[in-house]
Image (spheres, grey):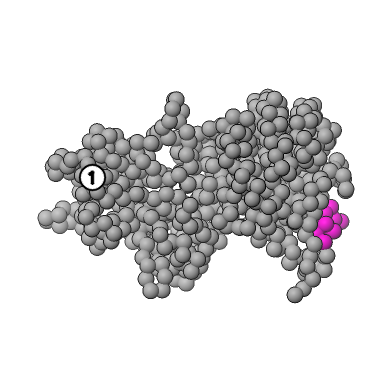
């Protein structure tokens, strides 16, 4: 098994990037740097939130003031939008949506604060170097690990072209800065920065393609007349979107990896709570652990319930 | 270098290096925690529940966090005793600590079957009889709440464990825990562990449904600690008694002072459960904290604290 550690990180920066969406950049200590030296996109870490204090009352979003009073005891799992090795060590970016008592607390993290992490955990994406296109499909907050994957592919697999398809219910549910260009149409600035072409899809058409991200990809596959062996799908998002991605992959005979999400107490294979149903003999295939066997699974192995 | 503190305890004839165990269902089958702690530093280790056949367990969500605790409804998911012997026992043999196997089943015969298969394995120091899980077929949790049935199953499993230590795990969901504790002792239990989780529910007010797929689950964590300490104290003073039947105290232990409260209430050893999820090396920190407490208070042996409530 790959190296994993319980370690401390220091907050370098924590700021709101769009209303409701925040990004924390964390500098890992030496033990964390060692553990993260071979991190794969799609892996995650368990962040200790219980000892982070609530922000001042006026900074807590009004709709979360009631919920924010709840105590936290368990850690929270987060993937990374960015992992950078610099001269002083490794810095990781954690993108989060403020929606409950844990993420409300994270708003109060400030430069120099120390946080406890366990990671990197689980199995990430496996890049197929022989495929010309890596199609990254993100739904809403499924975005972070695919940003990491896009950059990872650009750095290590020059013969593979990553192209991102970023979906959400509407413009305000996209955790990126979206720009509109006369030639390129709508695109995400963060992907542009790492040299990855991006397409935006919103269910309500408030920006970009009107419809599901899977429909947006399908249109692209048809327009480009992509052969099945030329492309691989790498997906993260709500389960209904992942199921649609697997159905699309099946229709076009394209390989597909999906990153699953489950409530988990530990992230390290102890609690057995994060099971994902997989295909096997008989009606009920075996359960696998999202934290250890996943979170990234081969799309054709997963039973969507 | 200050004088060393004697942390060893005698637990039903087994010598434990210290009183701190990891609790069933929160520490895996064997070496899952090895990346985060030296398992040989534990007083002991209690495996997750093992049944005769593999069990898939409940659908998800299987856990939900609540204020100062969590609910679980895993459904005794496990690999089954044969795969446990083949794949997990070799790792247990390397752990160099006291390992108890938690036994579960749907019928008395199933408990006996698992006990028999493991009774001759030298890697196993003892067993914990899980008769307090809501998934037992014989009337569910009433199986572990009926003194007559407790005495019978304890007696039958005791005959199957080949002389190894048998610890019976009690549910807190009874009017009088001394009655169930006494039944286990009458059935031949060498030790008692208490408490298991409390049946509980969390509701999603948006969907108006319980969050757990199983609808209800077992509450653990700091929320239950004072109740568990009270129950340990009652069983210690009314049933187990000093120097008689040792108690493994558990329920919401997160710090050394939590563990010391259990010892003072009458527990000979303690098991750390939910806290390990949040802090994988929690048990080791507790051992260190106990030692520091003894040093500070001038206590030469941790055994001097057991049942020391004034």
For the point 73% across and 66% down, the residue is B292
Q: Which residue is mark 1?
A: A231
Crowding at label 1, few (<14), some or many (≥20) Cα neighbours within 10 Å? many
Q: Is residue B252 visible?
A: no
Horizontal arrangement in the rendering, residue B267 relative to residue A41 (left or right): right
Query: Nearest the camera: A152 or B147?
Result: A152
Image position, residue B107 (x, y; %): 68, 25
Q: Quadrant of residue B102?
A: top right
Q: Viewed as shown, does residue A253 lie left or right of A84? A: left
Left or right side of A252 for A73: right
Q: Which residue shows up at 21% across the image and 58% down it?
A: A179
Q: Main secondary structure of the magenta part?
A: loop
| Residue for point 48% across, 69% down | A30
Disc 1: which chain? A
> Magenta stretch: residue A235 in it?
no
Nearest the camera: A158 or B154? A158
Question: Would residue A31 be visible to someone looking at this image?
Answer: yes
Where, quadrant-wise, is the C terminus of chain B in this rendering?
Answer: bottom right
From the top left corner, tell me how far across and down residue A127 is, in percent: 31, 50
Query: As displayed, is residue B101 above or below residue A152?
Result: above
- Estimate the x, y position of residue B103 in percent, counting from the top left: 68, 35
Q: Which residues are magenta?
A: B301-310
Asked if residue B306 is among those painted magenta in the image, a careful observer would answer yes
Total of numbered circles in the picture? 1
Residue at 48 percent of width and 42 percent of height = A289
Which element is circle 1 on?
strand
């Amino acid at each position: 098994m790959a190296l994993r550690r319980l370690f401390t990180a220091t907050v370098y920066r924590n700021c709101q990037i769009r209303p409701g969406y925040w990004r924390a950049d964390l500098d890992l200590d030496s033990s964390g740097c060692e553990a993260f030296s071979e991190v794969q996109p799609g892996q995650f870490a368990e962040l200790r939130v219980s000892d982070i204090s609530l922000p001042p009352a006026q900074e807590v979003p009004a709709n979360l003031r009631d919920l924010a009073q709840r105590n936290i005891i368990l850690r929270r799992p987060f993937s990374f939008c960015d992992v950078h090795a610099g001269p002083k060590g490794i810095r990781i970016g954690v993108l989060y949506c403020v929606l409950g008592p844990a993420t409300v607390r994270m708003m109060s993290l400030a430069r120099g604060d120390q946080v406890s992490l366990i990671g990197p955990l689980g199995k990430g994406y496996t890049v197929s170097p022989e495929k010309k296109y890596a199609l990254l499909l993100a739904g809403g907050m499924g975005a972070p690990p695919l940003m990491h994957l896009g950059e990872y592919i650009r750095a290590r697999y020059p013969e593979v072209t990553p192209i991102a398809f970023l979906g959400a219910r509407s413009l305000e549910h996209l955790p990126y800065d979206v720009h509109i260009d006369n030639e390129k149409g709508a695109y995400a600035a963060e992907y542009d920065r790492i040299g990855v072409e991006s397409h935006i899809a919103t269910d309500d058409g408030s920006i970009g393609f009107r419809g599901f991200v899977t429909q947006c990809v399908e249109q692209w596959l048809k327009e480009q007349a992509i052969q099945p062996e030329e492309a691989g799908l790498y997906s993260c998002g709500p389960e209904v979107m992942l199921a649609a991605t697997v159905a699309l992959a099946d229709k076009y005979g394209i390989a597909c990896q999906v990153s699953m999400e489950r409530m988990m107490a530990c992230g390290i294979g102890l609690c057995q709570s994060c099971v994902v149903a997989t295909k096997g003999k008989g009606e009920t295939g075996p359960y696998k652990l999202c934290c250890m066997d996943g979170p990234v699974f081969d799309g054709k192995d997963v039973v969507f319930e | 270098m200050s004088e060393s503190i004697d942390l060893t305890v005698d637990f039903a004839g087994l010598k434990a290096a210290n009183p701190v165990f990891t609790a069933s269902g929160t520490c895996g089958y064997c070496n899952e925690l090895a990346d985060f702690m030296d398992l040989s530093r534990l007083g002991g280790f209690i495996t997750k529940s093992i049944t005769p056949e593999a069990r898939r367990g409940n659908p998800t969500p299987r856990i939900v966090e609540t204020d100062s605790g969590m609910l679980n409804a895993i459904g005794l998911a496990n690999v089954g005793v044969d795969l446990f012997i083949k794949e997990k026992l070799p790792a247990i043999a390397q752990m160099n600590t006291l390992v108890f196997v938690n036994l579960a089943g749907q019928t008395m015969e199933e408990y006996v079957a698992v006990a028999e298969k493991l009774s001759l394995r030298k890697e196993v120091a003892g067993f914990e009889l899980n008769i307090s899980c809501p998934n037992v077929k014989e009337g569910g949790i009433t199986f572990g709440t009926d003194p007559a049935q407790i005495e019978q199953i304890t007696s039958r499993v005791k005959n199957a464990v080949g002389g190894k230590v048998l610890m019976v795990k009690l549910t807190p969901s009874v009017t009088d825990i001394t009655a169930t504790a006494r039944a286990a002792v009458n059935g031949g239990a060498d030790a008692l562990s208490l408490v298991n989780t409390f049946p509980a529910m969390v509701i999603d007010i948006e969907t108006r449904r319980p969050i757990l797929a199983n609808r209800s689950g077992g509450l653990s964590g700091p929320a239950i600690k004072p109740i568990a300490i009270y129950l340990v104290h009652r069983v210690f003073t009314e049933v187990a008694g000093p120097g008689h039947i040792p108690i493994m105290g558990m329920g919401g232990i997160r710090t050394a002072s939590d563990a010391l409260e259990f010892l003072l209430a009458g527990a000979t050893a303690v098991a750390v459960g939910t806290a390990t999820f949040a802090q994988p090396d929690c048990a080791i920190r507790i051992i260190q904290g106990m030692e520091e407490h003894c040093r500070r208070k001038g206590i030469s042996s941790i055994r001097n604290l057991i049942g020391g409530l004034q």
